[in-house]
Image (spheres, grey):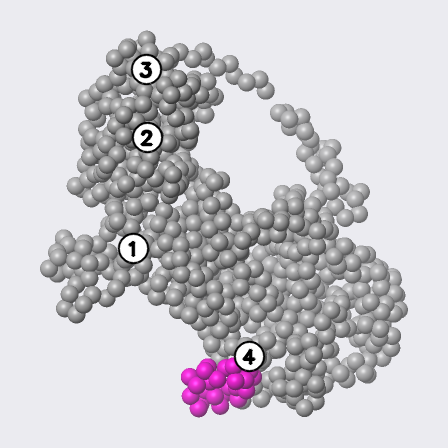
Amino acid sequence: MSKPILARYVPQLPDGWVKCPRFGDPRFFEGLNIIPCKVPLGRHFDQQTGASGRWTLADAIRQFRGYGMEVATVIDLTKSRNYYHIGKEMDELAGMHLPTDINYVKIECRGRGESPRPAEVNEAVWHIFIHSVTPELQNKYILLHCTHGFNRTGFVIVSALMRLRKDRGLSVRRALQRFAAARPPGIYKDAYINDLFKYYHETREPRVLTPRVPAWKGNDDAEDAADAANEDAGTEEDGGAAAPPAKEIHHEDIWSIGERVCGEEAEWIKMQVCGLLRLDSGGRGGSLRFPGMQPVSLSLERMADLAAHRYHVTWKADGTRYMMLLLPQGTYIMDRSFNVVRCEMRFPCGSKRPPPGQKAAYPVGRPHNLTLLDGEMVVDVDPTGQAPPRLRYLIYDVCMINATPLLQKPWKERYRAIDSDIVKPRTTERAYIDDWRRPGRGAWDPARAEYLSPPLQYDYAAEAFSVRQKPFWPVHQIDKVFERFHDPHKVGHESDGLILQGYEHQYVPGTCELLYKWKFAHMNSVDFKLRCATVPDPEAAADPASGRRPVMLDPAHPAPLTLYLLDQNKTRGSNIVDVPLERIDPHGNFHVEFPPGVDPLDYDGKLCECTFDRERGVWLFMRERKDKDTANGSRVYLRIKESIINHVDQDLLVGTLKDSLINRPEYASDRAHLGPAELEVLRRDVEAWRERQHMQYEQQQMQQHHPPPPGHGRGAGAGGAGQRGNGHAAAGAGGGAGAAYGEGEDGPQPLSPPGGDPHGNDDDYHGGDNDGGTYKVSDADDGARAALKRKRDPGDGEGGEGGHGEDGHGGVPRGRTTVWGPEIDEPHEHCPAYEGFGF
């Protein structure tokens, strides 16, 4: 398409510019050294301004230098680039023998009735912040201007005061007063003032009045036609500022939760986080990566760790992982892709208790500075339907509080700090605010008030999300944790398993081998990158603009949908290398299915979370992962595969934890809090569990040494060589359904190892067992069962007390190959089913 012909630019003097005061007083801005002023006009406006009215950028910088204020930064908020040309102005300064090393920042704010957008304000305040903390610039000044230097300029300066001087107790009303004193009459557009109160979640009191439009501006509050001509000339018209669409409630999309920040600010935040966690580069090859502590899947070979360490448990929310950095200038959240957004929230510190008989000045102290939190975002739904869905951030760990590192502290101390230092101050201040807002309470009275200062007019409910501490329980309450899955009044969001947190463990950035996640069998999932083999769709019409024809899946391709993993051996820093699943797991299952109505082409090149259907041997698409930028690593996949094949069922998990609670010294503190009756109930539960495990072990041994005769159950010829990649047994290969099931026995055709021998003699899948017995899930399965038996009877093995073998993991052989088995994993009767999983 041809570009529209742009009108020839004719300079037009902004209405009232000549009589508009040139600049304001920077002494009212709490040491930020900002000079608010109107836009300087270039020499091409000389005929309209006259010699007496001329005021170029070079003239302004020279004038301020004469007042002892050397300008080092210029922030231009106008949308036009025609008021002056920065290169020509610097040449003029050089001709005056004045310094030209001035940082010029252009931020195009729309104006003309629309207040600056959050991303524009964030960028402007970021440059003000950098100027104020740079030692060589701290005594120099910032020249900040829009067209007349009142509304957009005032909006940014008030925002800078609210963020960079929050520790001085400033409110929006006081910040507006500061700007009005520096540049009378202040912001004179009522919509701008309302937007400031709304953005900073404060209530506008009736006493906050909007100033009159200045006399030099005229009676028309709207921007004049000259402004429009100067701003739109030379640029394509964007059709005006459309109202932003209403945000939907999503926890996985970070861009719908917070505001974008400029690239420099995002990199600075990431460097701060990596520095707080003592990560020099933050990742391989010097690149920055998400530094949060990552759990590993609980498998049979790791069960001994539950006895060797004291654990607490909580539910695993089906939410999105975020880290949160609290700074005076804002709250920053980061997802696992290390994207950074800013949220306007309030996180005050606690206050010291006053001397006896005296009132405290205020219930809370200054805002947090350099506090790093770890948690997950969920969408809580009211089961009664009376309240709308609400975003909620559940904090489960804290790495640093006010620049005090907590990485080496045990989790029990870090967890207590979440309540005392983060949640409780917010709750205390909110209670004080709400108490004086109650109907009939009357105006604030210092004689009746609990504190010397009135409550801040802040609305916590207006924040982007609420904040809570995620509860954890000792292991003797694990049954109650499972009960919460069935009670929507206790858990208002989806959950898919448990988290086991070491009570005495330190915070480990990256993968933590002792932090475990446990999922229900049908909810274990892997994050793949999907790639589609496509061809042009012959039946679809070509796009009239691009001429391209829509594509469709290639029907001739043997595997049009390919799953990829992150190659952890070849990926270095930002050089991401993906590898097909078939190369990582040659004996695995590679076919993926999508539910009806979901087009795989919509997810081409995107991250797809998939769960495994063991009955059919296929991966099932669950959802897109928007919070990550890479698929699961190749080694991570093998661990998840192990947890899927050798799944730790609920009975084994609960029994192991209760057994450890009764018998292990690591849980002595937990036992001390239990009464005799509770201990007796636990002992009976453990004895019953041991008996069940013993019977299960004996039954498995009997089946392995005495397989059923052919025609009864699954025999050696049950299912021949299936097609690699789809997990389905090939028809007629090694016998049909009658070869797998006894006469009159109904059931699905069992899966065979991909590429296996028709007679079941593939040593890679049968562990060298050629006796025609039943197909084993994995070599690790028998070792794990034996390790559990040795744990119950330490005298039978070499592991001694606790069942630790030579490798320190209960005698379970490491490095063995885990292969996909044909057994159907029946859903547990207590396992919740959520919408979107049962396709």
Left or right: where does residue 315 sit relative to residue 330?
Answer: right
For label 1, the residue is: 366
Q: In the picture, which quadrant includes the N terminus?
A: top right
Task: Pick whichever of labels 1 and 3 is earlier in the sequence.
Answer: 3
Residue at screen point 47% across, 88% down: 679
Q: Which percent across, then down, holds residue 753?
A: 80, 64
Left or right: where does residue 241 sit relative to residue 561?
Answer: left
69 or 721: nearer the viewer: 69
> Closer to the observer: label 1 or label 3?
1
Q: Is residue 68 visible?
A: yes
Label 1 to label 3: alpha-carbon separation: 46 Å
For residue 681, above or below residue 94: below
Circle 4: residue type: Leu
Circle 3: residue type: Leu
Residue at screen point 66% across, 49% down: 572
The part of the chain drawn in magenta is 659-683
Q: Residues within 10 Å of mark 1 (few under 14, many from 20)?
A: some
For label 2, the residue is: 70
Circle 1: residue type: Arg
Task: Pick whichever of labels 1 and 2 is earlier in the sequence.
Answer: 2
Task: Pick whichever of labels 4 and 1 is earlier in the sequence.
Answer: 1
The answer to the question of whether label 4 and label 3 lie on touching residues, with beta carbons closer than 8 A, is no
745 or 108: nearer the viewer: 108
Label 2 to label 4: alpha-carbon separation: 68 Å
Label 3 to label 2: alpha-carbon separation: 28 Å
Q: Which percent across, then down, holds residue 7?
A: 45, 13
> Closer to the observer: label 3 or label 2?
2
